[in-house]
Image (cartoon, rainbow, N blue to C red):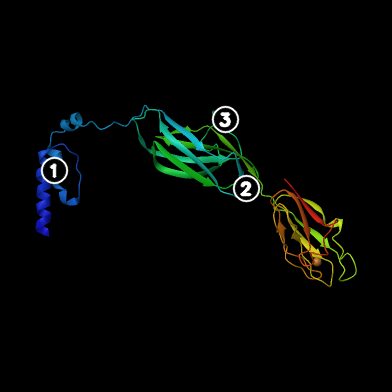
Amino acid sequence: MRAAVLATALAFLVLVSGCAGDAPSGPASARPSETAAETAPSPTNETSAPAPAPNRTAQLNVTIRDAPAKAKADAPITIRWELRLDDDNASRAGLTTSLRWGPTSRADDALADDAYANEAGKTEGAEAPGDFEATFTVASAGTVYARALAVDNGTPHWSPEVSIVVEAVIPPTIHTVNIFAAGPIGTFVGMSNSMSITIKAGDGVKWHNNDNVASHSAEADAGAPEAFHSGGAGGGQDTGIVYFTKTGTYAYHCGVHPGTMTGPAGGRIVVQA
Ligand SMILES: [Cu+2]
């Protein structure tokens, strides 16, 4: 094993000294190449393979590529941005980039380092060209403003500002509809008009059974925008909650007594946008 390593090292040494000027590379066993490179005339390196000098003249552009116009409070917001140089052949390393955001809009000429209260997605040692993203949440409703920032050798480069309207998450309203037995026990004749209500899409409805003898429920008639069944409720109990997301008019009847608790005055849930 040791003999094999030595042979490899020797072979590499011969190879390297045969093409003086190559940059040191390879595994630790090829260490002798460093000596070979150092003793080689250095000008050869620059004339035969000029390394691209760091291009400090190319303009660095910071651009937000993807940001939502609207978002919900406490839900993740993802913004993507890119660092590009106006010279396609140029590249630059050692940048620090992040997304800055806050509740106050900032003009192009008022961009101090702390212009925005919050920072997300910070990358140190970033390269241009490069693509970056940050995800953050906003706790309350309102408009937030954001710019991507890249600091190159101490000089800040800001993207144009974007704004995001953050909407509060409104919990759905839960409506209660009372079920009354419309006639003597065992002779239900229908559901009353009071069981018809108008709600907003996303709201929920539960039914309270005011009949202390029989169990009742609410079930969509055929032809409703969507089928539903509340599940039964005994006397004095509530049914489960049915959430309505599709707009339209939902006629319904009692699932326990479909033949009697329905009819011309049957219940209606009208769901509006
Ligand atoms: Cu019933």
Q: Tell me the residue at 46%/33% (across/down).
A: 62
Q: In this view, does 104 lie above or below 11?
A: above
Quadrant of the image containing the C terminus = top right
Helix, strand or loop status at disc 2? loop
Tell me the number on the disc at residue 35: 1
Quadrant of the image containing the N terminus = bottom left
Tell me, yes or no, whether the two marked residues, 3 and 1, touch with CB atoms within 8 Å.
Answer: no
Residue 12 drawn at (x, y percent): 12, 46
Helix, strand or loop status at disc 3? loop
- Judged left or right of residue 34, residue 224 is right
Among numbered discs 3 and 1, the one appearing first in the sequence: 1
Locate ligand 1 by image quadrant: bottom right
Residue 176 vs residue 99, the one in the foreground: 176
Q: Which amino acid, mark 3? A: Ala
Residue 240 vs residue 182, the one in the foreground: 182
Tell me, yes or no, whether the two marked residues, 2 and 1, touch with CB atoms within 8 Å.
Answer: no
Q: In this view, does 213 lie above or below 113?
A: below
Quadrant assignment, res 43: top left
Residue 223 drawn at (x, y percent): 73, 53
Residue picked out by circle 2: 73
Residue picked out by circle 3: 107
